[in-house]
Amino acid sequence: MIQQIAFVIVALIAFGLAFFRVKDLLKLMKSHNGRYSFPTDIIPRLTRTLLDVFSQRAVLKKPIIGTIHATIFWGFIIISFGTLEQFLGTLVPGFNFGFLGNPIYLIFLFTHDLFTLLVLIAVGAAVFRRAFAAPKYLGRSSDANLILFFTGLLMVSIFLMHGFLILGTQFHYSHREALFASFEISKFLSNLDFSGSEFEALGISFKWVHMILVLGFAVYIPGSKHLHVLAAGPNTFLKPAKTEKPMTSIDFEDESVEQYGAGKITDLSWKDALDYYSCTECGRCQEVCPAWNSEKPLSPKKLIVALKENLYANKSVIFSGKTDEITHVVDEVNTEDVFWACTSCRACEVACPVFIQHTDKIYDVRRNLVMMEARFPLEVQTVFKNMETNGSPWAFSSDERINWADGIDIPLISSEPDPDYLFWIGCAGAFDDRNKKVVRSFAQILKKANVKFAVLGTEETCTGDAARRIGNEYLYQILAKTNVETLNRYAIKKIVTTCPHCFNTIKNEYPEFGGNYEVLHHTQLIGDLISTGKIKPRKTDFGGTVTYHDSCYLGRWNGIYDEPRNLLAAVSVGPVVEMEQNREKSMCCGAGGGRMWMEETLGSRININRTEQAKDTGASLVASACPFCITMVGDGIKAKDYSNSLVVKDIAELINDATN
């Protein structure tokens, strides 16, 4: 009876403390003001969550540490049933799961013993990795070390409990064929000069050690980085269902909205708070971040951890209701430079095993800095002014938008009102001399294939992608609504563009403003033209091997990886080689997220780093499918003086040159 009363008291205290800590976390989540709509597709999400969580699919993308983590995860699930047996056996003396009968109970005991051993081995491997083979992105964590220590201690306590109780002759511990590891330990312990009752007492003592450690975990986890044990499952459920992820909009007509973007931590959404709670601090996001890898102050991992710490630091103020005293989300850790360093490539989000959405938070903070506080890089002011007056980031008049087509008969939509495709040129294609060659090449391909197409000409204006991602949502919406009105006036149904940024914006973000179109990237349409025999490019020798650079907005933002590669394979005589970082792990060129228009003054230049990766393949040609990437890689080639051995071209140029 004393043991039962003691257990009830200890358990009530532990679960009570855990409850209040979790309650505070939920209260902090509820304090957030940002909008986040709860999804309605419950069943598919539950199914996917169960598969992701229990298969540890995302974690296992890194096989070695993934296997270590998955072993500990699966082990804790199995061992939890053993813990439940111990809890119930303490409340009801003599209780165990033996009522399940053989062989079920024997399988349970064997599995429990096996995973206790495997978890202990996995903990040892994790400790070795952290002590002797830790990758730079992992970092040091006393919290993680403490968890590993107590996890290992928990496994040891289970083995000692089993070993001593086997010697103490409790009946369900006599199944030696099932408790194979514990039986070997009991043989070692049998050398101790104790009686059966003393062995049993020691077994019960270690059972208490085991139960107190479990209850201690329940109290400790809500306040540690291992909070992800509770939060990662819900966060997996709420992850975007598709690769495409449009930015959230601001309703400027809602007069009750006085705050645009996130100036305080509570201006973010409750889903953002769940992201902080879910972070494992594994560093996979930091490992692939182009900003961090070029010595910028942005680390996606540190960003999330610092946001969580900002939230915790404001806890008492939030709970007191004094919201005007909440500190700014931009602080001594997450400085302005941190938020401006992001290229919005989403490499961090693809790498994250718990599906944290880093870019959303950066966008919201940028919106506040731009629209509420007018704090942004000086050169961006010129970009905004050009977009407002010229409908382009460049200081060119809209009258010059059709000059790229000089010498080519290009139909305007005003004279070709029902085309199969509207060819969206984009600002780079219209005004940048290098990228004018790309849109001319693609237009010539369309003409060779007898595709009925037209362009807007001077009626086209910037999609607003850069304005939105820099943080000027108001300017973006003006440009977006203008374009949607123009496109709908001409009843446009299909659009093709050579620019992944235009592609992403029109395809994924214009529908919110009534712009619903079938949008293709030019590599997709060229592939269709080849497969249907409308063009027949010949195999061409490009002077050596070819490598392909993935555009972030084509790849990670829209899942288009194969189409460009298929086109290269169709026309290149030489081999197509991959850079070390390719497809979803590809390194950004450095131009996304509005960085195309900002000076790169901190660390090394991202585009030069990527150019060196291309050079390392031994290729003589870098193929691209994005005007920004062509500009950035081209600048990298010039900066490194590789012009005699390396060139960059758009796939449309290669296909056009190979087609009669």
Image: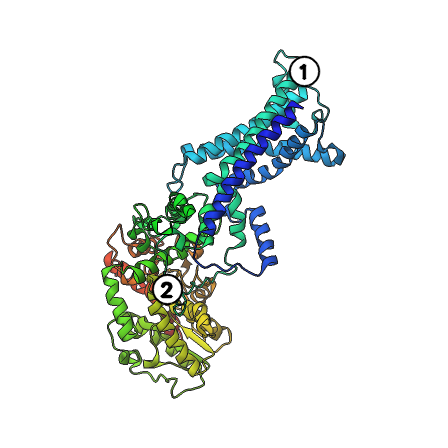
- Disc 2 and disc 1 in contact, CB within 8 angstroms: no
Tell which of 522 and 31 is nearer to you: 31
Element type at marker 2? strand
Q: Is residue 309 left or right of residue 518?
A: left
* Residue extending farthest top: 193
Q: Quadrant of residue 134?
A: top left
Residue 540 at x, y percent in the picture: 39, 68
Element type at marker 1? helix
Distance between the Cα atoms at labels 2 and 1? 76 Å
Residue 455 at x, y percent in the picture: 37, 80
Q: Quadrant of residue 543?
A: bottom left
Residue receiving disc 2: 624
Residue 364 at x, y percent in the picture: 37, 58
Q: Quadrant of the N terminus?
A: top right
* Number of numbered discs: 2
Q: Is residue 345 visible?
A: yes
Q: Inspect the image, locate mark 1, and give the three-letter code of the amino acid beneath it.
A: Ser
Residue in the image at 53% along x and 44% along y: 230
Tell which of 323 and 153 is nearer to you: 323
Q: Quadrant of the C terminus?
A: bottom left
Q: Is residue 499 left or right of residue 242?
A: left
Residue in the image at 59% along x and 25% along y: 208
Residue receiving disc 1: 197
Q: Is residue 7 left or right of residue 482?
A: right
Tell which of 270 and 655 is nearer to you: 270
Mark 2, mark 1: which one is toward the viewer?
Answer: 1
Q: Inspect the image, locate mark 2, and give the three-letter code of the amino acid beneath it.
A: Ser
Residue 91 at x, y percent in the picture: 67, 30
